[in-house]
Amino acid sequence: MKIMTRADMIVVALAVALLPWLYLSYWAPATQGDEIRILVNGKERMTVSLHQKHQLTIEGTLGTSIIDIHDGKARFVASPCRGKQCVHTGWVSHSGESATCLPNRVSVLVAGNEQRFDSIVF
Amino acid sequence: MRPAFIYAGRALPAITTAIMLTILLSACARQEEPLYTQQLLTFGTLVDISIWGVDKARAMEASRQIGEELQKMHNDWHAWHDSPLTRLNTALASGATVTVPPSLLPLVQKSVVLSRQSEGLFNPAIGKLIKLWGFAQDDLPGGPPPDAAAIAARVAQHPGMEDMTLEKDRLRSANPAVQLDFGAIGKGYGVDLAIERLRKLGVENAIVNAGGNLRAIGRHGDRAWRIGIRNPRGPGVLASIETHGDESILTSGDYERFFEYQGKRYHHIIDPRSGWPATGTTSVTVIAADAATADAASTALFIAGSQGWHEVAKRMGIKQVMLIDDKGQVTMTPEMARRIRFEVSPAPRVKVSAPT
């Protein structure tokens, strides 16, 4: 009697073939966000892919905030506030990360399919 | 014995069906995730709410109520716009005995206790000093820092919570220099009240994160909530923690509110002993049961710095602490080290240090 029948071999082959799928769906670190959501005054203004190069000009309550997006990350480059806390925040790229210009009421939130983190403490 | 291909021929459809079902089922499960998230610009910050396991209409209603409540607290506790707090401060400065409005009373009571436990490092009575530094205004100051003599004069007045006498809701200050500013506890306490409200509405799994002041209850379905801790220097997330049951995670950092003047950073965590921004620490992360305690403790431990933090943590009953000093050295208690997971590579060198 053979140690492995053809049926066994098929089962093993299928199991091996399924491994990459299992890995991708359950283990891959899905840290990178896919898109950013821009909120003005808490209301959704637009959703933009993080994988294209954009420069967005967003009208907030004080004036225009400029947001740069490229290589999977986004940041405020200018905003009509005094403190520039939004610009200090720098690049955001992971799902759940955000940058906000409170005086101008503009928020940038990174969203992805599977969030690596449910919330971020800063 | 039958040839093997007969087995294969019988087994194959069954295997294929099983695989297809697995893929289909896991896809459905992901789509119907009962997670509701909402971001609100309120309470002077971005409030991030996640609710798991209730239908969308209920979750929306709960978020709306929290938003309303937080906005009300923000108005009541505001330290520089006309508010019940500014009116209370005016009365305290005149030496009068005043009735504390119900919206402020629990905050005052909690602050008295936490300030005493921290030996005055968490000191919400230094409102005059915060104002002098320009952190009690909508826009961040641009520098220069205040005059050293003016700072010294305010420190010499020694305002502290121990100057206050509270009988029921009647408050008096023996020191006219006391001006209350709840900047180092208000958001944490607000988060506590928001969680309490959610529970009353039957929500058992949720996160409320008000500008980095976070409390999480329950779970995200069949797994724990995963919380990221922002890298204090550089972009992204430094480490993560999974919460158990009901926990608050807060960080106080020198990068949250600051201005730079002539190449020097002046941040918002003022050491009440010197009157200047506390030095030596970059960030402190604390896990505690309630967010108000964690908020006050993270400030007090930040000020205590790498020399004194164990002592203060012990007195405040805080066991899970991570402190990053200005040289980038990461120190944590054994209780914190057991749960934290670094998300940067290479992971920083960590010193685990227990109180003596």
Image (cartoon, coloured by chain):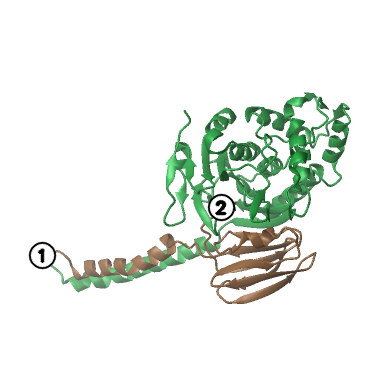
Chain colours: A brown, B green
Three-letter amino acid code at the position of disc 2: Pro
Task: Indicate the quadrant where residue A82 lies.
Answer: bottom right
- Circles 1, 2 touching at the beta carbon (< 8 Å): no
Please tell me whether mark 2 sits on a helix, a strand or a loop: loop
Front one among A23 and B234: B234
Marks 1 and 2 sit apart, C-alpha to C-alpha, by 64 Å
Q: Is residue B290 left or right of residue B237?
A: right
Please tell me whether mark 1 sits on a helix, a strand or a loop: loop
Report the residue marked by disc 2: B232
Three-letter amino acid code at the position of disc 1: Met
Q: What subunit carries mark 2?
A: B
Total labels: the figure holds 2
Q: Is residue A94 left or right of residue B210?
A: left
Position in image of residue B93 (x %, y %): 86, 32
Position in image of residue A117 (x %, y %): 53, 55
In the rendered structure, find residue A1 and report the number of the disc placed on it: 1
Asked if badges 1 and 2 are on one and the same chain, I answer no
Front one among A105 and A96: A105
Tell me, yes or no, if residue B181 can be seen here: no
In percent of the image, x 38 and y 63: which residue is there? Answer: A23
Position in image of residue B289 (x %, y %): 58, 37
Position in image of residue B110 (x %, y %): 70, 31
